[in-house]
Amino acid sequence: QVQLVESGGGLVQAGGSLRLSCAASGSIFSIKTMGWYRQGPGNQRALVAATTADSSTNYADSVKGRFTISRDNAKNTVYLQMNSLKPEETSVYYCNGKVSLALGPYSGSTTYYKYWGQGTQVTVSS
C-alpha cells in the first residue's frame, strides 16, 4: 500500500503565500509523476501543477509565474509554493502520485498506479 499525506494548507489573505508538502510512503519502488490538483465548491478536480522524476514541470495557465512545484526524490516528497494567492483559488488541494510498487528490493511493477492524498484546505480571504 501507498499513502500520500499533504500538509501546509490554511487560511491566508489575498496576495499571501503558502507552501504545501506531500510525502509518499509505503511499498514504493519509484514514482513517475507527482502533482497537485485542486477542487473548489461545485467544481471538478483540476490540475494545478505536476513534475516528473527528471524534474520537468507542467502548470495550469492560471498559476504560471506564481506557483512553483518542486520534488525531493530521495524523500518521495513534492512541494507546491504558492505566491500571490487569489480568493478564487480557495479549494481543497490534493496530491497525486503515479507509483511503481516495490515487488522486491530491486524490482518494481511495470504498471504505475495512481494514488491520492486526503486533501488539504486552502482558504484565501479577500
Image: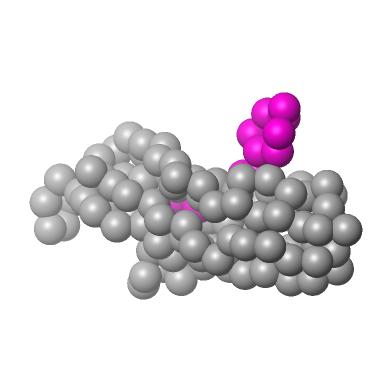
Q: Mostly what secondary structure, the magenta segment? A: strand
Location of residue 87 with respect to 78 vertically, above or below:
above
Tell me residue 69's x, y (percent): 63, 63
Q: Nearer the viewer, residue 120 or 108?
A: 120
Q: In the image, residue 78 lies at what x, y percent?
A: 50, 63
Q: Quick check: 9 above or below 90?
A: below
**Segment tinted magenta in the rendering:** 31-47
Where is residue 67 drawn, in percent x and y?
74, 63
Label count reads 0
Which residue appears at 33% of the width and 35% of the height? 111
Magenta span has 33?
yes
Q: Is 104 positioned to the left or the right of 54 in the image?
A: left
Is residue 46 visible to the viewer in this orientation of the structure? Answer: no
Task: Give the camera-side residue of 104 and 93.
Answer: 93
Q: In the picture provided, is 71 more to the left or to the right than 48? A: left
Between 98 and 10, the one nearer to me in the picture: 10
> The C terminus lies in which quarter of the figure?
bottom right
User: Is the residue 19 above or below the residue 36 in the image?
Assistant: below
Say how the picture is coloured: one colour
For the point 54% across and 52% down, the residue is 120
Residue at the image position 80 percent from the left and 66 percent from the top = 13
